[in-house]
Image (cartoon, rainbow, N blue to C red):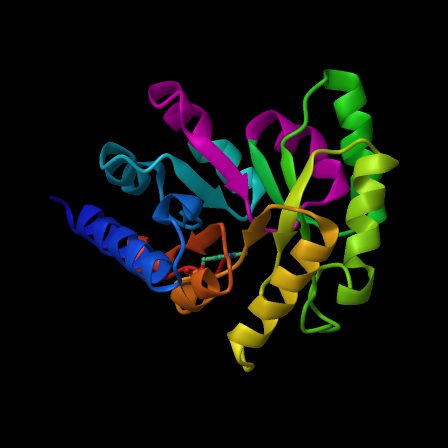
Amino acid sequence: MTEVAARLAEVQGRIRSAATAAGRDAGAVRLVAVSKTFSAEEIRPVLAAGQRVLGENRVQEAKGKFPGLKADYPDLELHLVGPLQTNKVREAVALFDVLHSLDRERLAEALAAERQRTGRCPRLLVQVNTGEEAQKAGIAPGEAVAFAARCREVHGLPVVGLMCIPPVEEEAAVHFALLAGLGRAAGLPELSMGMSGDFETAIAFGATLVRVGSAIFGSRTVAA
Ligand SMILES: *Cc1c(COP(=O)(O)O)cnc(C)c1O
């Protein structure tokens, strides 16, 4: 077994244990292996080990790596976990199966227009700025439920859940609890929360998608 496959197996084991400890079905938590900054050749062993859900944070970088990988693994499911500029919507809709960063009205409009044009739209999660940080993207918690409803009802978009990235210096659990409450209020089943440092806590609070990069691929040497 390669080193990366061993780390993947370890993370999968920790996900199962955290789900069991929380009284949840382990199958209700899906692992998104975040491969940003790693090359297609570094991603292949993870695919060979059976992982099929991968995440990237830049459209351009994913475009360089994934068409070839998708050709070899047709059931590969690709998620965009980073911000999406409106001028990249066309490429993103063509390449990704799930977008975690629907964070503004203009983007909702652009996705609706692209859906109209192509008949295609990835499943969407609304990014919520749970820490209300000025520098961070996302809808304010107080507006998230109404925004999600507007995206579905006015724009006809397939919004399936909410996503958050807690402030680094704060207790993540508070933010996971807030997101879970908003998800219930919005009637949305998916919660994308938890990264390498805190995915077990996120699972305790109901995460259905955990976004794990460095615990699988190793530490990133390039800024992402
Ligand atoms: C990079 C990234 C992750 C994965 O982070 P790790 O700490 O390496 O697990 C998760 N979510 C988003 C939005 C990211 O950009």
Toward the viewer: 192 or 8?
192
Q: Position of residue 179 (x, y in %)?
A: 63, 63
Is 144 on the left or on the right of 13, as rendered?
Answer: right
Does 88 lie within the magenta span?
Answer: yes
Q: Position of residue 49 (x, y in %)?
A: 22, 37
Any part of residue 167 in sight? no
Q: Position of residue 122 (x, y in %)?
A: 63, 31
Q: What's the magenta region?
A: 66-95
Measuring 71% from the left and 70% from the top, which residue is drawn there?
A: 135
Q: Tell me the quarter of the picture where residue 52 sits.
A: top left
Toward the viewer: 212 or 221?
212
Measuring 54% from the left and 49% from the top, which residue is drawn there?
A: 57
Measuring 56% from the left and 45% from the top, which residue is drawn there?
A: 58
Q: Is residue 196 above or below residue 131?
A: above
Farthest left residue in view: 1
Q: Tell me the quarter of the picture where residue 151 sits.
A: top right
